[in-house]
């Protein structure tokens, strides 16, 4: 379990490195707003869902009286580590890829150095996340894959969409 946590940490570091390398490479080439979007938008879009997903299991366990069997914090921590961390890391990677593709579509060959700087650490982040998740799957019930898939799809869609006020 601690090895999976270490892989998740390395995946987060690789994802941060990917966006940082792309931002440094693209500085002065593209609009600063797009660089800011690439670096901060996926995390800003996904952080409210992480907070809600942490609070919801705690509230359910407190209301249902599950605190007699386990502590009130055990369920949220387990859900955070087993479901939310892999889903967030995958969604963060795919959202960043989506934004990078949008930059490439707009700037074409001028943005190619940013893609070259972005792809290796981002692919490494995705690989590390999937490796850690596959290590965890062996110890969990079969329904875990379904729950993880649903969370990953929802978080990825939310990470790729932009909120437009009405």
Image (cartoon, rainbow, N blue to C red):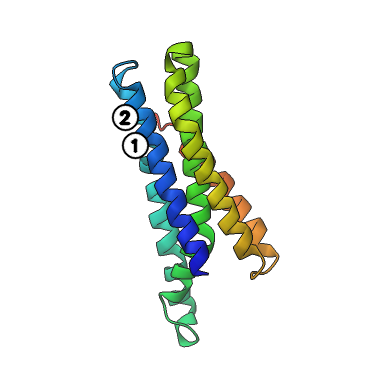
Kindly identify the residue that appears in the image at 47 percent across and 83 percent down.
70
Q: In the rendered view, does 134 fall on the left or right side of 61? A: right
Query: Residue 83, percent across and down?
Result: 53, 59
Kindly identify the residue that appears in the image at 46 percent across and 61 percent down.
6
Closer to the camera in the image, 19 or 161: 19
Q: Residues within 10 Å of mark 2 (few under 14, many from 20)?
A: few
Q: Is there CB contact under 8 Å for labels 1 and 2?
A: yes
- Residue 7 visible somewhere in the drawing: yes
Kindly identify the residue that appears in the image at 48 percent across and 12 percent down.
108
Circle 2 sits in a helix, a strand or a loop, which is it? helix
Looking at the picture, does residue 101 appear above or below residue 12?
above
Looking at the picture, does residue 18 appear above or below residue 9?
above
The circle on residue 23 is none
Closer to the camera in the image, 85 or 4: 4
Query: Residue 80, percent across and down?
Result: 46, 62
Query: Residue 124, percent across and down?
Result: 52, 43
Query: Residue 32, percent across and down?
Result: 29, 22
- Residue 161 visible somewhere in the drawing: no
The circle on residue 40 is 1
Closer to the camera in the image, 7 or 69: 7
Kindly identify the residue that appears in the image at 43 percent across and 21 percent down.
113
Q: Residues within 10 Å of mark 1 (few under 14, many from 20)?
A: few
Q: Quadrant of the C terminus?
A: top left
Looking at the picture, does residue 21 appear above or below residue 90?
above
Q: In the rendered view, does 148 fall on the left or right side of 92? A: right
Q: Give the residue at the far right of this rendering.
A: 142
- Which residue matches tag 2? 36
């Amino acid at each position: 379990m601690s090895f999976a946590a270490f892989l998740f940490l390395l995946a987060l570091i690789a994802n941060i490195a990917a966006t940082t390398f792309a931002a440094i490479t693209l500085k002065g080439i593209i609009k600063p707003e797009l660089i800011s979007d690439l670096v901060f938008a996926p995390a800003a879009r996904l952080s409210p869902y992480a907070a809600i997903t942490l609070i919801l299991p705690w509230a359910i366990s407190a209301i249902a009286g599950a605190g007699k069997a386990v502590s009130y914090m055990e369920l949220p921590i387990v859900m955070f580590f087993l479901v939310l961390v892999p889903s967030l890391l995958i969604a963060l990677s795919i959202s960043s890829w989506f934004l990078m593709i949008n930059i490439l579509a707009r700037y074409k060959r001028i943005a190619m150095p940013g893609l070259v700087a972005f792809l290796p650490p981002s692919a490494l982040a995705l690989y590390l996340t999937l490796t850690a998740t596959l290590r965890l799957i062996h110890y969990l019930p079969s329904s875990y894959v379904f729950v993880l898939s649903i969370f990953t799809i929802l978080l990825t869609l939310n990470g790729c969409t932009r909120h437009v006020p009405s």
